Structures are given as structure tokens and as C-alpha cells.
Amino acid sequence: MSTTRIVDIAALPGAREADERATELAWRLPTELAPLARIALDYRWAWDPDGPALFRALDPHAWVINAENPVRQLADLPPHAAQLAAGHGPTLERIARLERVLDENRARPETPVRGIDQPVVFVCAEFGIHPSLPIYSGGLGALAGDILKQASDLALPMIGVGLLYRKGYFHQRVDRTGLQHEYWTQIMPERLPTVLVLDETGAPLRLSFPLFGREVAFHVWRAEIGRVPLYLLDTELEENDPVDRWITARLYEGNPLTRLGQYGLLGLGAVRALRALGIEPGVLHFNEGHPALAALELASEHIERGVSLDEALDLARHDCVFTTHTPVPAGNETYETASFLEAFAELPERLGMDEGRFLDLCRTHQGSDEWPGMTPLALRLSRRANAVSLRHGEVAREMWRPLFGDPPADEVPITHVTNGVHLPSFLSAPMLGLLDRHLGEGWLDRASDPETWAPVEDIPDEELWAARNESRRSLVEYVKAKSIQDRLLRGEDPESVKAVAETFAEDTLTLGFARRIATYKRLFLLTYDPERVRRIFADGPPVQMVVAGKAHPLDENAKQMLVDVFGLSEAVGITSRVAFLEDYDLSVAAPIVGGCDVWLNVPRPPLEASGTSGMKSAANGGLNLSVLDGWWVEGYDGENGWEIDGAGPEGEDEVAQDARHAHALYDLLEQQVIPLFQDRDADGIPHRWLRMVKRSLRTNGPRFSAARMVEEYASNIYPPA
């Protein structure tokens, strides 16, 4: 194959605009700080050990107010603060080192993907890159962000495509009863580390896609994720009517017609944007089914060149791969047939097919009257499809058997690539420092190799325990500050708020439950038996818990679970031991996964496709206590955490399963977890606990790193058959 790049990723449209933006931003700064402008426009700073601290130190209060947005931090930097930084030697050394890191990162030779000589184009409805770019909601977005970051670290040729949501995902407020309230804030991309892509005349690049019988115009923005450009499509144009401008207003908008507009833009619009940008994809990677219409846009291009419909579909299929992320119906949504046809009325005509065949491409059962959806379309028009864990692969093959003609499940062409996490983004400072000292220089570049983690066994228990204590201490300080703010905003009594905050202790066993609040995640199991919960938190050795998560605005069952947790905590008198942190996002997640001793996960099996929060906790020296589902089926080995049997007796209904899992959870906490944590030597070191931590680090560290995951995509999914 040819390894000569037809497309120079670094020189694609938007790169020049970024340079001009950096020059403009640098003009406001003292000469000594000018390199920060370029650094701020490349999110590579966000996963460098010095990056966040460098920008924070310029003005710590403003860093919080600016939602950790480095562009705004520099633009609003008061002159006196700028002069102080410009004369501070350690700050200038950090700037020089970080500038050198960025230059070296861009200068590395590209790592080719076997069989393709053009970039991988990774398309997703959400990307969790950093809190300052709020275009994500939960695990899918965090994973997409990790894939782009890891591709940059591995120097893989990759380009991201998504949507620029002007109001992002909702912010959460919780009242004194635990009832969630949502609100949205406006995003100003002009003040983010993003640039508007211009055409050859210097005007904003204007493109359009067909929707509901009209052309909807959109612009393209670019963000730098290290070596990987992320292009974001935006319908907030004056020429569009208010309904069309709303398409890119809110992530996972509840209105199905708006979602059809979003997925039309993400599919049809993505291909049109790639063409306008001069990008010929080596392969299109659909991360969930939302962008699946891109395959039909590719097919229409082939038809315009005189190819038959069947051949055009085959050619499009050859250029696409697909990752399915959930067996939950809400993640594989379908749409009312008439609305679907109205939204994309011109597409069947452009493809030369009738409406029946168009709908059949989007149905599990062809020839039926079931509503169409994007997941069946993605499965039919991708050359490879994968689930996101070994267990999810089994579930997905059984689930999608009808689409492939009901063969035996092991013959359904869906493989798996188990998810992983981008370690530099989620390792706490104490744990990163510990592993840097013991795993050798450049260990993160070898994170997918189990041998890299072998020296963990030789880390002195005293050092490992000190790192864990420091991480927990940081979490407790964060919980105290944030919970005081959250509780005061709820209108709670200041004196009781202060007393509750002081109860949280840095030397206490800390449990964590932080994730999207959905019914199948079963938050209610934590409070299933109020009396046992009271005993665990109030009668024995001290235990405390951190809870965080958002329920979708339309998921009333999930919202009620949160109300129930608040009510029970109040009723049994454990409010001082359970802290709920509002407005869960990447900035809230980092201290929780870094500091919790035990990560709780109790999904209803087999609905947990993978889950990544437990992987992040494990990498930080936390131990997992989880239902045996998702990634934990592969992660658990009997000595590196605790499992709750997910299978159960044949014919067990959900009520019985809930009871069994809840009591198993309480039994494990009372009989194994708490006693093991309290088992100390004369110096207060819990050696048996740390033996389990080391086992978890050695087994789960390499297996669930994003490095291993992206390497598997590059070797097993992206190359042509």
C-alpha cells in the first residue's frame, strides 16, 4: 500500500484560522506569555501534567468562573496578573516545556493503519474532550474523547466529526427533596478553543443538507485535540429559520423531529463537510448509529458516477465500520415512519430506490411495519461491526440475529473491542507520580503491555498507601467545598451544612457511585433495605459515599430514584455520610474516580454494555464491587475486587433479582470490604487491601487502557477485509 498521505492533516482547513486566532490572542499578552495563546488552542495541554495547573495559576478564581476555558482565561487576564506571571521563572519554564511538548507531538512520524492510506474519520454525536467544550453528556462522549486523545498519543491518522451544540447538555440543580431541575446555558464558540473554518474567499464556509424538503445551512468549526482535528457542524446561522437553528442547540434534545435533524446533519452533513474540506476518508467510523445516514450519502455519490444501486451500497459499506454501544432500547431509538420519510424525502429518490427499500434498510425485520432506526442502517451498511465488551458482543449478536436472517448467534457478524480509558486524562496526581517513579520513563507509551505494569508488585505498600491517602484527601476537600455550595443553593441551614461537611473525613473508607442516572443502572439498590443501609453507615466502622449523576430530562423513573435516595438518607439519618454532588461532568468525575476506595456498579444485567467509570477508578488504585456484567466480566479474576453474580437462577424476575443483588451488595460491604479496609498493621497499613489493589492495577491497568482499545481498532476493525 502507499503510505504517502494525500491529505496533510495538520494543513487541513481551519489550521490557518487557528494560527491567526493564536496571533490575535498573543497580542493581548506580555511577550513572555505569548506562547500560551497557541497552547490554549490545542487541547493537548489538557492531558499534560503541567497544563491545567499552568492556566489555573494565572488567576485561580477566574479559572473556576471561566469553566477551565484557557482561551477565556487569557483573553480576560488582568494586566497585573499577566505581569506577575511574565516575571515568574517557574511559570516561564512550564510554558517553555509545554510548548516543546506540543512541537514534538506534531513532529512525530505518523503511525500508518494497515490497508488504508487516508485518515480514519471518527463520527459521533458527542465528544467529551474537556469541561470547557460541553458537547457531551456521559459515557459515549467520554469514550469518544478518549479515542481522539489516544489516537493523537499514538500518532494515528484520525479526524473527528461531531456537532457544536450551542447550549450543550443540561446543567443540573437538585432541590431539598432530591428532585432534579434542568437548565441550559449558551455556548459562545468564539470564546472557546475552536475556530470557524473559512472558505477560499475568507468567508465562513457555508454548506447545506436536505431536511424536511428544504436545505438547512451549516458552518464548520475546528478544535485541535493534539494531532487530531475535530470538526463540529453548526446550524446557528441567521439564514436558517429558528427551528433549523435549534438542530444544534441541545445535545439529545427530547423532540424526535429535532433529533432527526441532528442525525441528518451528522450523517449527510458530515460527508458534505468532508468533501468541502478536501478529506477522502480511509474509513468512516460510526460511533453509535446516529451518523449512519453518511453511508447513504456515500452511496448517492457513487450513483451520481453511474454505478448501480446495489454496487453503490456495497462500495459505501466497504468504507464504513460501526460500533454499537448499548442494548438498551433508548440507545437504539426508532422514529415514526411518516416523520422519518418526510425528514429524508429526497434521499430515496436520489438513491433510485422506493420508500419501501429505504425503510427496510433501517428496520430489523424487512418488509414489516416497524419504525425505522439508525442502528439497523449502520449494521447493514458497515463492513465491520463491533460491540464494546466481550459480554456485550454476546448480547448484541443475540439481539441482532433477526437483522441477519436468524442464524446461530455465533455466526452473527458482530465482534467486540472492549472499551478502555485514556490514562493521562484520569489519573490523579498522586497516582501518576507513583506510577511514574516505578513503571519507568515513557511507561504511558507502553500502557497496553502487561509487562509495563509488572513493577507494581514491587511498589512498597507504604508508598502505595500514601498515594491513595493523598488522592482520598483531595477528594474529601473537593466534596466538602462542592457539597457546601450545593446544599446552600438548595436552601439548607448554613450551620447544619457546615456540620455535615465536617463529617466527611480523609481517612474514612469512601465508596463511589457516579454515572448517568438511568433506570437500568439501579441507583435504588443502594437504599433497597433502609435498616441495613443505616447499620452500614452509622453503626460500624466509619464509611462514607459520594454519589453523582444526571437523569435525562424525560426519564421520570430515574429522577424518582434520586428523590428516593435523598429521602432515605434523611429518614435513616445518614445525610452526613452520603454526599450527592450536583451537575456531574468531566470536572466532577476526575476527583471522584481518583479518590474513592471502592467503586460500586449495580446495573441490571445484561444491559451494561461496558462501563468505563470503574476502569478509571481501577487505574487510580480503587477497587471495584460490581454486578458481573459489561467490562467487569473480563476484568474480575477473583482476587482484584468483588463481584455480584449477574446470572441468578433460571426464571428469576426483576423483583427477585433486585432483592438478591441488594443483599449481596450489603453482605459484601459488611463481611468483606469494610473488614479488609480496617485490617491494619501497627503502622496503620492495610497490607491485604493493598495486595488486592496491586492485583487490580496489574490486571486491569493494561487491559482497559485506551491505548489497548485504539490499537485493537487500528489492527482489527479499520483495515479492509
Image (cartoon, rainbow, N blue to C red):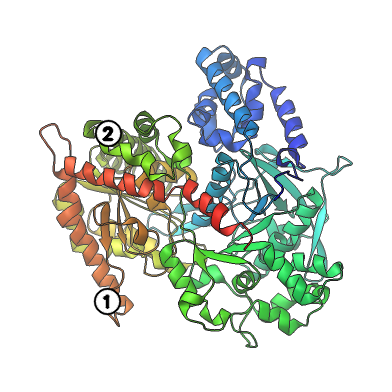
> In percent of the image, x 47 and y 52: which residue is there?
173
- The 10 Å Cα crowd at callout 1, few under 14, some 14 to 19, many 20 or more, is few
Residue 365: x %, y % from top left: 59, 84
How many numbered discs sit on the rendered protein?
Answer: 2
Report how far apart the C-alphas of labels 2 and 1 lie in the structure.
43 Å
For the residues bearing labels 2 and 1, Cβ distance under 8 angstroms: no
- The 10 Å Cα crowd at callout 2, few under 14, some 14 to 19, many 20 or more, is some
> Which dot marks residue 459?
2
Amino acid type assigned to the residue bearing label 1 in the image:
Ala
Closest to the observer, 104 or 481: 104
What element does badge 2 sit on? loop
Q: Quadrant of residue 536?
A: bottom left
Q: Quadrant of residue 603?
A: bottom left
417 w.r.t. 231: above or below: below
Residue 59: x %, y % from top left: 53, 25
Residue 532: x %, y % from top left: 18, 61
361 w.r.t. 64: above or below: below
Q: Of callouts 2 and 1, which one flags the residue occurring earlier in the amino acid sequence?
A: 2
Could one spot residue 492 in this view of the protein?
Answer: no
Closest to the observer, 683 or 378: 378
| Residue occupied by mark 1 | 656
Could one spot residue 376 in this view of the protein?
Answer: yes
What element does badge 1 sit on? helix
Left or right: where 545 falls relative to 26: left
Residue 311: x %, y % from top left: 76, 73
Q: Residue furthest front?
A: 1
Amino acid type assigned to the residue bearing label 2 in the image:
Ile
> In percent of the image, x 61 and y 38: which residue is there?
226
Closest to the observer, 700 or 179: 700
